[in-house]
Image (tube, grey):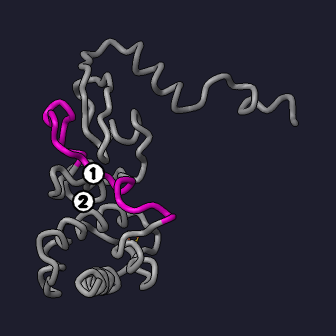
């Protein structure tokens, strides 16, 4: 062990430093109870923080990605009561008891959902930055429309930008997952 390695000597993890900094900032905070991925979470948050920031910085749910923060790229998509919403445009204090689902609330590595399996098999994720949002938007679509047309899939995912795949593999993965789910 290198005794001059500050990373090893540091008493706090980076996330703890961020939390301490937040506590000492003079901002208005509110104690909230959020329902995230099926669990009730009590949390003290600055009222100005977006849902995206709270999920990533205060709850460690980094599957929800930071993109434009302007409501244009879709990469911060989560489900609120089953519908896709842009977490960069939502404040947690607006949400009350709404059910929030992030990509961590879908299947895990031990048991992928049919959509996750199809994305993996067809190479629908390349850099993967848009993938959590794509999975959530497609999950919402398939719950409402088990047999979507290609056009319906494209429309449902239209707000989610992908700079890698050209979208073809993503649409095919949604079709494959829909077919497998219908035939059980
Ligand atoms: S980060 Fe929310 S839409 Fe781009
Ligand atoms: S896979 Fe890279 S942005 Fe979509």
* Distance (Cα) linking label 2 and label 1: 15 Å
Residue 10 spot, x, y in % from top left: 69, 25
Judge whether 100 appears above or below 7 on screen: below
Image quarter for residue 7? top right
Q: Which residue is mark 1?
A: 101
What residue is disc 2 on? Answer: 74
Q: Is residue 49 left or right of residue 95?
A: right
Residue 13: give x, y in percent of width and height. Answer: 60, 30
Magenta highlight range: 87-110
Residue 102 percent location from the top left of the image: 32, 52
Q: Are marks 2 and 1 in contact (CB under 8 Å)?
A: no
Mark 1 secondary-structure assignment: strand
Q: Nearer the viewer, residue 70 or 110?
A: 110
Residue displayed at 39% across by 42% down: 56
Vertical comparison of 5 with 127: above or below:
above
Q: Looking at the picture, how far across and down is residue 19, in whole percent?
A: 45, 24
Local crowd size for mark 2, using a 10 Å CA cut-off: few (<14), some (14–19), many (≥20):
many
Q: Horizontal placement of 78 versus 126: left or right?
A: left
- Quarter in which the N terminus is drawn: top right
Mark found first going from the N terminus, 2 or 1: 2
Mark number displayed over residue 130:
none
Question: In the rendered structure, does residue 91 fall within the stretch colored magenta?
Answer: yes
Q: Residues within 10 Å of mark 1 (few under 14, many from 20)?
A: many
């Amino acid at each position: 062990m290198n005794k001059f390695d500050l990373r090893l000597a540091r008493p706090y993890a980076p996330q703890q430093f961020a939390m301490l900094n937040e506590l000492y900032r003079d901002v208005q905070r509110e104690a909230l109870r959020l329902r995230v991925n099926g669990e009730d979470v009590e949390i003290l948050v600055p009222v100005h923080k977006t849902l995206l920031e709270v999920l990533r910085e205060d709850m460690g749910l980094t599957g929800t990605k930071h993109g434009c923060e302007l409501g244009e790229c879709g990469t911060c998509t989560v489900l609120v009561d089953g519908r896709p919403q842009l977490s960069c445009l939502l404040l947690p204090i607006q949400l009350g008891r709404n059910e929030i689902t992030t990509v961590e609330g879908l299947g895990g590595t031990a048991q992928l959902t049919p959509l996750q399996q199809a994305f993996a098999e067809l190479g629908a994720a390349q850099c993967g930055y848009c993938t959590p949002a794509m999975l959530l938007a497609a999950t919402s679509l398939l719950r409402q429309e088990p047999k979507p047309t290609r056009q319906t899939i494209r429309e449902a995912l239209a707000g989610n930008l992908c700079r890698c795949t050209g979208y073809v593999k993503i649409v095919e993965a949604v079709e494959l997952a829909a077919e497998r789910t219908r035939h059980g």
